[in-house]
Image: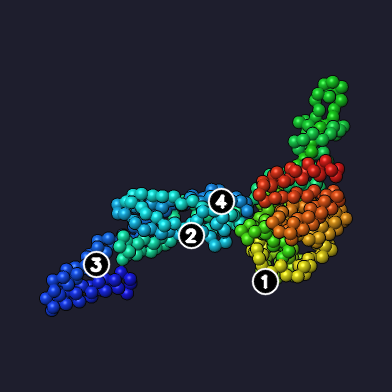
């Protein structure tokens, strides 16, 4: 039995007792008093609210719907009374994904809406890596007399999803190329768009490449060579060890999430340019990546990889690997033993082609990525480092970690390694340009 029925039965009972007592005792005042609970019942019956599904509609607006981990996202929820009756006490809760933190405003509200009236609730979320789906709106109405309550979950029109990603414009790759058409300029002459050199004419050279101006001036045939655009082979080494799982605050994305998100969009960009791309994720639990990555190439149990290639299967396997890796560490989780998840550099080097270029994506939370980069460069590989900053500045421990990270970046740059020191609060392109300028001005 609901509250409304209980109140109705109680009111009727009281009215009958008062009326019976008035008749039996001959007291008119008791008969008049019996009208009070009857009036309460009558008022409750005429003030009933319509079903929530018929009385309320909602539309959600998310800006932006596609962003990067750590960015603020504004949400506007417009709630409308679709009837001509007054909704004196309407309470709503938006279906915010449990993984996202509300940093300003509230997705909850208590409203009073006249017939046909609408109002907008605004709040702000902080995005995290991945795709997040909003749930239905929970709405509850109370009648004026508070004798009638209606509750329902309502579908919301408009935007329903947030996706956190990155879209940097370019990545530093050395001019080591494979004979596949791509976007890295080769260091030899052939057919292409950019001028490379002029050589003596050889029988069979196409007429379109003959230097006709020189022939008109000197009556000697020569052939123009151009730099062809070729593809390169790139391996992204993504640091998802427990030590990389720090975050500035509980509502900020972790270093793990930032590294996986950044790596995912680097892969998209490089594959779109027809390069051969692979991903090696270091620091995974065996249970978290069962069936993900290539088991035929046995790394230690804390590493999985997708070897460099360019195909839809490669893209799918990389996405699965990064999705599994991004979910392994959250703020406040156990950091576990340092060093236990470090893959020996020799295990990585022995599986690489001499022409493979390396992009290390790591928050540089300890010295392991520095040592790995040192050994990779020693064996002749071109290495670049992308490092999201996740150390907190509000505690002495965080300040110490920031200083240690800065020293690691200086050490890498001292070895002529391109390092992009990226504050997630700024666009990646800004950090990339700053790092390139510093590299050119200081170490070259």
For residue 411, above or below residue 281:
above
- In space, the residues marked 2 and 1 are separated at their CA atoms by 31 Å
Tell me, for residue 200, which label it has, or none: none
- Secondary structure at badge 2 equals strand
Q: Who is closer to the viewer here, 66 or 198?
A: 66
Query: x, y percentage for residue 205?
Result: 81, 34
> Dot 2, crowdedness within 10 Å: few (<14), some or many (≥20)?
some
Residue furthest bottom as drawn: 24
Residue at left 67%, top 51%?
Answer: 424
Contact flag, marks 4 and 2 (Cβ < 8 Å): no
- Secondary structure at badge 3 equals helix
Q: Is residue 141 left or right of residue 122?
A: left
Query: x, y percentage for residue 134?
Result: 50, 58
Q: Is residue 116 left or right of residue 254?
A: left
Q: Is residue 13 left or right of residue 417?
A: left
- In space, the residues marked 3 and 4 are separated at their CA atoms by 48 Å
Closer to us: mark 3 or mark 4?
3
Contact flag, marks 2 and 3 (Cβ < 8 Å): no
Mark found first going from the N terminus, 1 or 3 = 3
> Dot 3, crowdedness within 10 Å: few (<14), some or many (≥20)?
many
Mark found first going from the N terminus, 3 or 4 = 3
Q: Which residue is mark 1?
A: 287
Query: x, y percentage for residue 18?
Result: 19, 74
Q: Is residue 183 left or right of residue 142?
A: right
Contact flag, marks 3 and 4 (Cβ < 8 Å): no
- Secondary structure at badge 1 equals helix
Q: Which residue is mark 3?
A: 41
Tell me, for residue 73, which label it has, or none: 4
Query: x, y percentage for residue 344?
Result: 82, 65
Mark found first going from the N terminus, 2 or 1 = 2
């Amino acid at each position: 039995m609901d509250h409304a029925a209980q109140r109705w039965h109680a009111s009727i009972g009281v009215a009958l007792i008062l009326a019976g007592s008035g008749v039996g005792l001959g007291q008119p005042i008791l008969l008049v008093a019996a009208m009070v609970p009857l009036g309460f019942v009558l008022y409750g019956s005429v003030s009933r609210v319509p079903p929530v599904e018929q009385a309320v509609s909602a539309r959600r607006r998310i800006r932006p719907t596609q962003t990067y981990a750590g960015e603020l996202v504004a949400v506007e929820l417009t709630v409308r009374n679709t009837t001509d009756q007054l909704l004196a006490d309407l309470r709503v809760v938006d279906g915010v994904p449990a993984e996202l933190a509300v940093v300003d405003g509230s997705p909850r509200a208590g409203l009073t809406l006249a017939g046909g009236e609408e109002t907008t609730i605004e709040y702000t979320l902080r995005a995290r890596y991945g795709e997040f789906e909003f749930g239905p709106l929970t709405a509850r109405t109370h009648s004026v007399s508070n004798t009638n309550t209606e509750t329902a979950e309502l579908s919301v029109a408009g935007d329903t999803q947030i996706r956190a990603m990155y879209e940097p414009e370019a990545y530093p790759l050395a001019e080591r190329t494979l004979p596949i058409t791509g976007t890295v300029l080769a260091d030899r002459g052939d057919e292409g768009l950019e001028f490379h050199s002029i050589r003596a004419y050889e029988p069979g050279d196409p007429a379109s490449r003959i230097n006709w101006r020189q022939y008109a001036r000197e009556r000697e045939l020569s052939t123009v060579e151009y730099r062809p655009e070729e593809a390169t082979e790139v391996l992204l080494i993504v640091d998802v060890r427990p030590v990389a799982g720090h975050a500035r605050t509980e509502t900020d994305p972790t270093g793990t999430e930032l590294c996986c998100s950044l790596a995912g969009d680097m892969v998209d960009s490089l594959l779109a340019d027809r390069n051969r791309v692979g991903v090696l994720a270091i620091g995974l639990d065996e249970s978290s990546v069962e069936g993900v990555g290539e088991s035929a190439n046995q790394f230690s149990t804390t590493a999985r990889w997708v070897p460099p290639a360019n195909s839809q299967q490669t893209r799918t396997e990389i996405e699965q690997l990064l999705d599994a890796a991004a979910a392994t560490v959250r703020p406040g989780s156990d950091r576990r033993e340092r060093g236990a998840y470090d893959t020996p550099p020799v295990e990585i080097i022995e599986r690489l082609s001499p022409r493979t270029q390396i992009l290390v994506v790591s928050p540089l939370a300890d010295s392991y990525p520095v040592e790995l980069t040192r050994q990779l460069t020693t064996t002749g590989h071109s290495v670049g480092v992308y490092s999201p900053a996740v150390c907190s500045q509000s505690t002495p421990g965080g300040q110490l970690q920031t200083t240690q990270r800065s020293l690691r970046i200086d050490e890498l740059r001292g070895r002529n390694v391109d390092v992009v020191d990226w504050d997630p609060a700024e666009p990646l392109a800004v950090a990339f340009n700053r790092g390139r300028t510093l590299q050119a001005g200081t170490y070259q």
